[in-house]
Image (spheres, grey):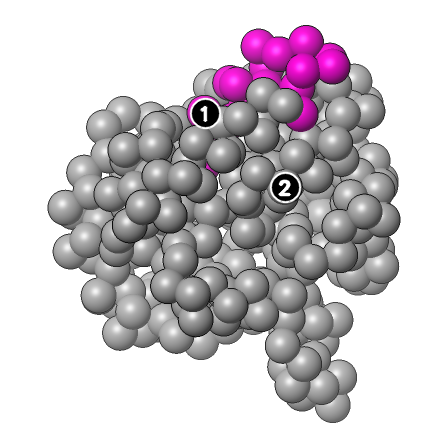
Amino acid sequence: RAEREGKRAMSRIAATFSALKRDKRTALIPYICAGDPFPEATADVMLALAQAGADVIELGVPFSDPMADGPVIQKASERALAKGIGMVQVLSYVQAFRAKNTSTPVVLMGYANPIERFGTLRFIADAKAAGVDGVLVVDYPPEEAEAFASQLKAASLDPIFLLAPTSTDERMASVGRIASGYVYYVSLKGVTGAGHLDTDAVAQVLPRIRKHVSVPVGVGFGIRDAATAQAIGRVADAVVIGSRIVEEIERAERDTVAPAAAAFMAEIRSALDKN
């Protein structure tokens, strides 16, 4: 019953994508690593990103072995862990953000280990209480995550999954059956922040994904500037940017970290809105 009621009320993520579709706009989804570069600035950076045009914010849960992430995000994770950032702190940043912003969805992105160490049911309850909207666990394949996905949905949280250039139709169908909120298409065979992004290849694969997946499709890994974001924004429902933002704020001083994030976000938002 709880799951049915959770599905009945439109999630903050679904409502955001619905409004964007109505306005014919592409969602902009930045990723930052919680606690990096300054733990006390994470909520401020999130607020600045939202004010500058982010539609959903992916908040990374630091982990010692983030295998899908390139060197930029790995180092961000290491810096955050060195400052003692764990799940309790991550959820406290979401709570601080929610005290000032009740409309922008927040997705926690990370790995199975920190969630399982925290306790899966405790994690879901505390994430819900903090104001989290969706959860993306990089190393939970859909075939092994049905119970977790239904527990998230019962708490009105969206389980979000990755697809890749190597994903089979079967994998896409598995994701399509249990994903909600959106699906994150990893546009490169490699790690975050890697090499050259082939926008034509992305454009060709999206119709295939949409045959199996009814939720919006976001594209990330390798989007580093306004021009690439704009090109991807013409074919995807959402553009996800992580490594480049992490680099921008890593270079900033404590009092300029939020403005630096906002300036970069505004540039990308402006490019997307020209589509």
- Horizontal side of 63 relative to 188 (left or right) equals right
Of residues 237 and 79, the one nearer the viewer is 237
The image quadrant that residue 272 belongs to is top left
Q: Residue at x 39, y 74 (%)?
A: 214
Circle 1/circle 2 CB separation < 8 Å: no
In x, y percent, where is residue 245? 51, 26
In x, y percent, where is residue 183? 44, 59
Location of mark 1 (residue): 244
For marks 1 and 2, give the CA distance: 18 Å
The image quadrant that residue 246 belongs to is top right
Q: Secondary structure at mark 2?
A: helix
Of residues 170 and 88, the one nearer the viewer is 88
**What type is the residue that disc 1 sits on?**
Arg
- Horizontal side of 54 relative to 48 (left or right) equals left
Q: Residue at x 47, y 19 (%)?
A: 71
| Mark 1 surroundings within 10 Å by alpha-carbon count, few (fewer than 14), some (14 through 19), many (20 or more) | many
Label the magenta part by its dominant secondary structure. Answer: helix
- Vertical side of 274 occupied by 145: above or below: below
**What type is the residue that disc 2 sits on?**
Gln
Camera-near label (1 vs 2) is 2
Q: Residue at x 37, y 48 (%)?
A: 273
Q: Residue at x 35, y 39 (%)?
A: 271
Q: Quadrant of the N terminus?
A: bottom right
Location of mark 2 (residue): 51
Residue 81 showing in the rendered view = no
- Vertical side of 109 occupied by 181: above or below: below
What segment is highlighted magenta in the picture?
Answer: 241-258
Of residues 136 and 132, the one nearer the viewer is 132
| Mark 2 surroundings within 10 Å by alpha-carbon count, few (fewer than 14), some (14 through 19), many (20 or more) | some
| Earlier-in-chain disc, 1 versus 2 | 2
- Horizontal side of 177 relative to 173 (left or right) equals right
Q: Secondary structure at mark 1?
A: helix
